[in-house]
Image (cartoon, rainbow, N blue to C red):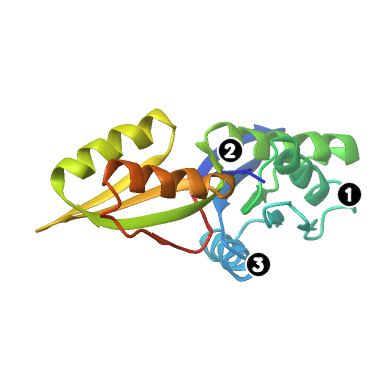
Amino acid sequence: MPYRTITERAEAEIEIKRSRFLGLVAPVADEAEAREVIAEQRSLHPKARHHCTAFVLDPDSRTQRFSDDGEPAGTAGAPILDVVLGHELTFVVAVVTRYFGGTLLGAGGLVRAYGQAASAAVDRASVVVRRELVPVRASVDYAQANALERAAEVRGWSVRASYGAEVELTVFVPVAEVDPALAMFADLTAGQAHPNVGDVEWA
């Protein structure tokens, strides 16, 4: 099952009635890394009133956490989480840091402000789709490598090559297409290649 995530951190800032809302989204691998990003934002902005957060993990987005960090319940963390889920993102943490401007925004105003700050950061992020792929590797000669690369690209498979006396060729294929990949190696090398099938990885 493919999933959507972001490739690097992105930030944005909005101001509403003199309150500043600094939005940050970052890719994370697990809950510990998400909490590191949150702690980092707290240390970067020690004078801010609130650091409201949400993160989503796992390919199926089953791990979801959020915090209002002192704002009225449901006015900050939940809207930030809604933004992440609304963009169908996972392995992402979002932090919205608020510098209070002296004017109360009310529950509805807070929901909009935190949601807008998170959305503005997400809009600046580069989204990528990760899929479960299986690496199929073999050592082949240069002529075989050229033929295999062309054939793999026609099928939409990505290829990684390391050049030495021979070419260490890795073709990344969907789980359901391992057998066709093995057949391609056999056909284009006249059975000379002896590919190894690696463990499934997200790429």
Q: Secondary structure at mark 2?
A: helix
Residue type (three-letter) at the residue carrying disc 3: Glu
- State if disc 1 and disc 3 touch (CB < 8 Å): no
Q: Is residue 168 left or right of residue 14?
A: left
Task: Work out which residue is located at the far bottom of the displayed protein and give it.
Answer: 32
Q: Secondary structure at mark 1?
A: loop
Q: Residue at x 49, y 54 (%)?
A: 134
Badge 1, how many Cα within 10 Å: few under 14, some, many 20+? Answer: some
Q: Which mark is residue 121?
A: 2
Is residue 8 visible to the viewer in this orientation of the structure?
Answer: no
Badge 2, how many Cα within 10 Å: few under 14, some, many 20+? Answer: many
Residue type (three-letter) at the residue carrying disc 1: Gly
Quarter where residue 14 is shown: top right
Task: Work out which residue is located at the far top of the displayed protein and give it.
Answer: 154
Is residue 71 visible to the viewer in this orientation of the structure?
Answer: yes
Residue 201 in picture, x, y percent from top left: 51, 58
Relative depth, front residue between 95 and 20: 95
Q: Earlier in the sequence, mark 3 or mark 1?
A: 3
Q: Earlier in the sequence, mark 2 or mark 3?
A: 3
Residue ID for mark 3: 31
> Quick check: 146 above or below 27?
above
Q: Which mark is residue 27?
A: none
Residue ID for mark 1: 74
Q: Nearer the viewer, mark 3 or mark 1?
A: 3
